[in-house]
C-alpha cells in the first residue's frame, strides 16, 4: 500500500527537480539563520547561487555529530525558540545527547514520513498498533505514534513496560502490529515461550523493528517466534527520527523519503561520493525541515544505494540494511574488525540468541577481548557444563578461524544483555588501563 502516491512515485527527473528547489530554499535559510553554516559556507567560499544540481552538493561542507554537540542546546536551530513546538534528543549512546527542535510544519512532515513506513509494511486503519519504544526524549515512541494515528490505526503507547506487561496488553487488546527495538522483540518472544504461551494466542501479523542494527537471522527468529512479518526501518533523531527510510512488502532495501531528504554515500576515508552499489557512509541533507535543518550530515552508518527499480512501484531510492557503523570498527591485536563480522560467526551456532556484547580490556599491558553471548532458554540447564563448554569452545574456534582473533567467549544468561532500547555492542575499557609507560 502506498500512502502518498504522488510523491512516492515521481519520476527521477521530477524528484530531482523538487529536491533542488527545496535544497536551494534550505541553504538560503541556514545561511541566514544558523551561524555555524554561515561560517562554514564562507570558509569554503561557497556561492549558493551556483548550487543548481545534486552534483553541486560536493561544493558544500559536511556536518558531523561533533558539530552538533558543540551547538548544544539551541545554536543549530534555524527558527526562534517561540516557533519550536517539540524538543527531543538523541539517546546519547555515543556521547552527549543532541537536542533537536521541531516546528508545527516539521511535525506534519514527520508524521507523513512515519505513516508512509507503516503503510509500506501493510498497516492500515483496522490495526491495533502497540508501540514498545520509550516515550521520552528518544524519538521512536512519539514518531511512530503520530504516524499510526494519521492512518487511522488504534495506538497503544505501551512504552517501556516489561515483557510480561507487553504480552498481557497484546493478548487482551488483540494487538496486530508491534513496534520496538528488535532486541526487545526477542525478549518478548522468549517471555512468550517461557510462559508456555503459543504465538497463536496472540493476534500479531506485522512488526516494525529499528533503533539498532539487526540481522536476517534475527528477522527469521522473530517471525517464527511471534508469527508476524518483520520489517526494517531507519531513522536518526538528528535527521528527523524514525521515518527516514523503511522496507516495503518486497523487503529488498529501505526506501528513502527523498522528497524530504537527499541521501549520499561517501567513502569515509576520502570523503568522495561513491556510485550506487558501493558500500560507504550514509550522508543526509534535510530539505523540508524548518527547526533543525542539516546539510550533508555524516551519519556514521554504513550502507549502499541499490540502483535497481523496486517491484512495489515506488521510485524512491533504496538503501541496503545498515551493516555497521564507521565508529564501530574495532582495532585489536593489529587487526580491524566490525562487530557485524563477529555476529555472522555467532549466528551459525545453535543454542544462542542473537544478543552479544564485545568487551575490550587491558591486562598486564595486553589487550583482551571477551565476547559475551546469550544462551538460548531452549539450551539445557547451566549445570550441564559439558554442553556449555563445548558450545563456548566452538564459538571461540569460529572467531579464531574466521577472523584470526584470540578472543575469550563467555556464555551469559538469557535476557541479560539489554533492555527495551539500544543494545551497546562494544564496551571498550582499554583507555582506562593505559599508562604513560605503555607504548
Image (cartoon, rainbow, N blue to C red):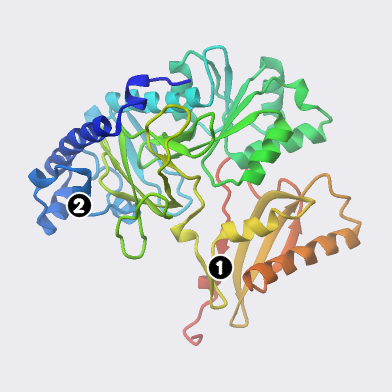
- Crowding at dot 2, Cα within 10 Å, few <14 / some 14-19 / many 20+, comes out as some
Mark found first going from the N terminus, 2 or 1: 2
Indicate the secondary structure of the residue bearing disc 1: loop
Q: Quadrant of residue 86?
A: top left
Quarter of the rendering containing residue 370: bottom right
Label 2 close to label 1 by CB (< 8 Å): no
* Residue that mark 2 sits on: 60
Q: Depth check: give the residue in front, 13 or 353.
A: 13
Q: Which mark is residue 157?
A: none
Residue 290 visible in this rendered orientation of the protein = no
Image position, residue 111 (x, y; %): 39, 24
Q: Residue 125: tell me if it is visible.
A: yes
Q: Residue at point 22% right, 31% down?
A: 18
Q: Which residue is mark 1?
A: 429
Q: Is residue 83 left or right of residue 123?
A: left
Front-most of residues 403 and 110: 403
Q: Residue at x 13, y 58 (%)?
A: 44
- Nearest the camera: 431 or 331? 331
**Viewed as shown, does residue 60 lie left or right of 267?**
left
Residue depicted at 57% across the width and 38% down the height: 181
Q: Nearer the viewer, residue 361 or 326?
A: 326
* Image quarter of residue 205: top right
When the figure is inspected, residue 119 is found, relative to residue 389, above or below; the finding is: above
CA distance for labels 2 and 1:
37 Å
Disc 1: CA contacts within 10 A as few (<14), some (14-19) or many (>=20): some
Q: Secondary structure at mark 2?
A: loop
Amino acid at each position: 500500500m502506498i500512502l502518498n502516491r504522488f510523491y512516492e512515485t515521481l519520476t527521477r527527473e521530477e524528484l530531482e527537480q523538487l529536491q533542488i528547489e527545496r535544497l536551494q530554499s534550505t541553504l538560503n535559510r541556514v545561511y541566514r539563520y544558523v551561524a555555524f553554516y554561515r561560517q562554514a559556507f564562507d570558509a569554503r567560499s561557497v556561492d549558493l547561487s551556483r548550487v543548481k544540481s545534486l552534483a553541486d552538493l560536493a561544493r558544500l561542507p559536511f556536518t558531523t555529530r561533533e558539530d552538533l554537540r558543540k551547538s548544544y542546546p539551541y545554536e543549530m536551530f534555524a527558527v526562534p525558540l517561540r516557533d519550536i513546538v517539540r524538543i527531543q534528543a538523541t539517546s546519547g549512546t555515543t556521547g552527549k545527547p543532541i537536542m533537536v527542535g521541531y516546528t508545527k510544519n516539521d511535525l506534519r512532515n514527520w508524521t507523513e514520513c512515519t505513516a508512509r513506513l507503516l503503510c509500506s509494511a501493510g498497516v492500515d486503519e483496522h490495526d491495533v498498533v502497540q508501540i514498545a519504544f520509550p516515550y521520552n526524549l528518544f524519538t521512536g515512541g512519539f514518531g511512530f505514534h503520530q504516524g499510526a494515528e494519521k492512518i487511522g490505526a488504534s495506538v497503544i503507547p505501551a512504552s517501556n513496560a516489561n515483557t510480561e506487561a507487553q504480552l498481557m496488553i497484546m493478548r487482551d487488546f488483540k494487538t496486530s502490529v508491534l513496534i520496538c527495538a528488535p532486541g526487545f522483540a526477542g525478549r518478548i518472544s522468549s517471555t512468550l515461550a517461557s510462559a508456555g504461551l503459543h504465538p497463536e494466542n496472540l493476534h500479531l501479523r506485522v512488526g516494525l523493528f529499528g533503533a539498532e542494527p539487526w540481522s536476517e537471522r534475527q528477522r527469521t527468529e522473530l517471525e517464527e517466534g511471534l508469527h508476524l512479518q518483520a520489517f526494517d526501518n531507519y531513522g536518526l533523531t538528528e535527521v528527523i527520527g524514525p521515518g527516514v527510510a523503511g522496507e516495503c512488502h518486497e523487503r529488498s532495501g529501505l526506501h528513502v523519503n527523498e522528497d524530504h531528504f537527499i541521501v549520499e554515500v561517501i567513502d569515509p576515508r576520502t570523503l568522495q561520493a561513491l556510485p550506487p552499489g558501493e558500500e560507504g557512509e550514509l550522508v543526509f541533507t534535510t530539505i523540508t525541515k524548518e527547526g533543525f535543518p542539516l546539510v550533508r550530515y555524516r551519519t556514521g552508518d554504513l550502507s549502499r544505494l541499490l540502483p535497481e527499480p523496486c517491484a512495489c512501484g515506488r521510485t524512491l531510492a533504496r538503501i541496503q540494511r545498515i551493516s555497521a557503523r564507521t565508529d564501530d570498527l574495532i582495532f585489536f591485536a593489529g587487526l580491524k574488525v566490525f562487530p557485524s563480522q563477529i555476529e555472522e560467526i555467532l549466528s551459525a551456532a545453535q543454542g544462542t540468541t542473537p544478543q552479544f556484547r564485545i568487551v575490550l580490556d587491558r591486562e598486564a599491558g595486553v589487550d583482551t577481548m571477551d565476547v559475551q553471548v546469550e544462551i538460548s532458554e531452549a539450551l539445557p540447564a547451566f549445570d550441564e557444563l559439558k554442553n556449555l563448554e563445548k558450545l563456548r569452545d566452538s564459538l571461540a574456534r569460529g572467531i579464531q578461524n574466521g577472523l584470526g582473533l584470540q578472543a575469550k567467549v563467555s556464555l551469559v544468561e538469557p535476557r541479560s544483555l539489554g533492555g527495551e532500547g539500544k543494545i551497546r555492542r562494544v564496551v571498550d575499557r582499554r583507555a582506562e588501563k593505559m599508562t604513560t609507560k605503555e607504548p
